[in-house]
Amino acid sequence: MSKQVKTKDRLKKFFRSKNEPERNKNTTNPKEKRKSLKELDNIETKVQSTPEQLTKVDLQKPIPTFQETGAPHKQNLFIHKLKLCQIMFEWTDNKDERPKEVKRQQLVELVEYIGKNKNIYTDSVLKEIVRMVDVNLFRTLPPKVHKNDVVENEEDPVLELSWPHLQIVYEFFLRFIVSSDVEIKVLKKHITKPFILKLLDLFDSEDARERDYLKTILHRIYAKFMSVRSFIRKSINNVFFIFIWETEMHHGIAELLEILGSIINGFALPLKGEHKSFLQKVLIPMHKVKSLTVFYQQLSYCVTQFVDKDPMLAVPVISGLLKFWPILNSTKELLFLNELEELLELTQPEEFKIVLIPLFKTLSRSIGGPHFQVAERVLFYWHNEYISGLIANYRVEILPLIYPVLHVNSQHHWNPTVNNLTLNVLKIFMTIDQPLVENCSKTYTESLKKKAVAAKARKSRWSELTKVQQSKTEEKKDGGD
């Protein structure tokens, strides 16, 4: 009786799921044990014979656990369970509930087994593992529910129906990939380039839980297999090219950029031409995409990592941002200004001098724009000690570009915060170089007078043209009479 109680406790501890299959409740029965041993003999016969396709019927037969199986038989049982987990189900209905639960329990057992045992990966086992992962994960993704990319938590999440099985398969595969028990040379035969491409295709899944697993797994594969690193980078580039220039629709861009952010962080100096090309041809144009808000943080991190490693890249990066600068989208413009501040903090004075004229022509439009948050964000640059120092050093070139909008904002802007910030910026310039401010004020006043004279002359010419037109019209009428 005590032996029976211990066995029950062991099984309860092993299967932590709430809904255990009924078959596990009576495994301690002697008749059931004899049945399981008989089934084990049948399993060994099947494994050793020609491979066959298992069906849902096999999931309803008694299946021994690893704990009640002797060491000589565990390898064959391992392969059999991997084959059982290759049986697929339709998840749009409530059919086959019992076989589904049995498969889930087999997957849980597999995860526990590979976590507790070593020297279990023979060539036949590896083939079945890759086949099991292939069958379960690599599928045609369902039609998209959201027509546009959405920020996480902004819309109702889309959940994969088969997640009760998928999650355990992903967990199994992740533990398998990170295991040091498999030689990389052997594993390379199974984790092939077509396999990696199939993984990349799954990044377009709408289920964020699946993308998170994929991100971790692909990053582990990149770290473990040096021979496929270049291939992974190029394959991700291809996904980005299609996203930027064709579809502008992909749910896994943020996760892929997160992987690349970690990869970029490990780039050796000096940077290769391939990496600089990726920055200029992929990361910079990605700023033009409508759904920038979804992956802005990851994209900004990747770009700033490049400039942090090589400050000379600040010029092409800032010039690229100005090329794709949003005109009518204030939300995107705020994101651009946030990223620009991070870049300017990494920019050396020599590079700053090269880009300051086109940069401050663009920033002057932002300061003088009607959206108060945009103007406020630019004026806060003067609260950054390093950036305000750069501006002070090149004030002779910068102030003439922005003085007109500063003057207008200080007198006419509707938002009091922007008005006060503008006055504060003018005060900073007055403290640093009062003659320059007075000269800019004089130049601005003269330009207003010239504009007024030009407007008056234009109005006068229009009046003359109107009179000429009216006289011609009257002549035509007289001629007709």
Image: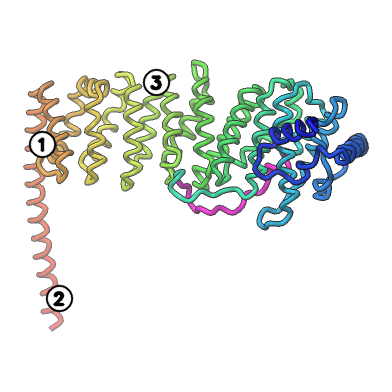
User: Which callout, 3 or 2, points at the residue further toward the start of the chain?
Assistant: 3
Find the distance from the CA under tag 1 to the CA under tag 3: 35 Å
Residue 45: where, in percent of width, then height?
Answer: 93, 37
Residue extending farthest to the top is 269
Tag 2: amino acid:
Lys
At x 14%, y 43%, the residue is 413
Residue 278: where, in percent of width, then height?
Answer: 51, 30
- Magenta stretch: dominant secondary structure: loop
* Residue 118 appearing in the image: yes
Which of discs 2 and 1 lies nearer the camera? The answer is 1
User: Which callout, 2 or 1, points at the residue further toward the start of the chain?
Assistant: 1
Residue denoted by label 1? 444
Residue denoted by label 2? 476
User: Which callout, 1 or 3, points at the residue further toward the start of the chain?
Assistant: 3
Question: Mark 1: which secondary structure?
Answer: helix
Q: How many neighbours does mark 3 have within 10 angstroms: few (below 14), some (14-19), or many (20 or more)?
A: some
Segment tinted magenta in the rendering: 134-150
Question: Mark 3: which secondary structure?
Answer: helix
At x 9%, y 33%, the residue is 443
The quadrant holding residue 382 is top left
Which of discs 3 and 2 lies nearer the camera? The answer is 3
The reply to whether dot 3 and dot 2 touch (C-beta < 8 Å) is no
Question: Mark 2: which secondary structure?
Answer: helix
Find the distance from the CA under tag 2 to the CA under tag 1: 48 Å
- Magenta-drawn stretch contains 452: no
Residue denoted by label 3? 312
Tag 1: amino acid:
Tyr
At x 49%, y 42%, the residue is 244
* Residue 194 appearing in the image: no
With 172 as the anchor, is 395 left or right in this view? left
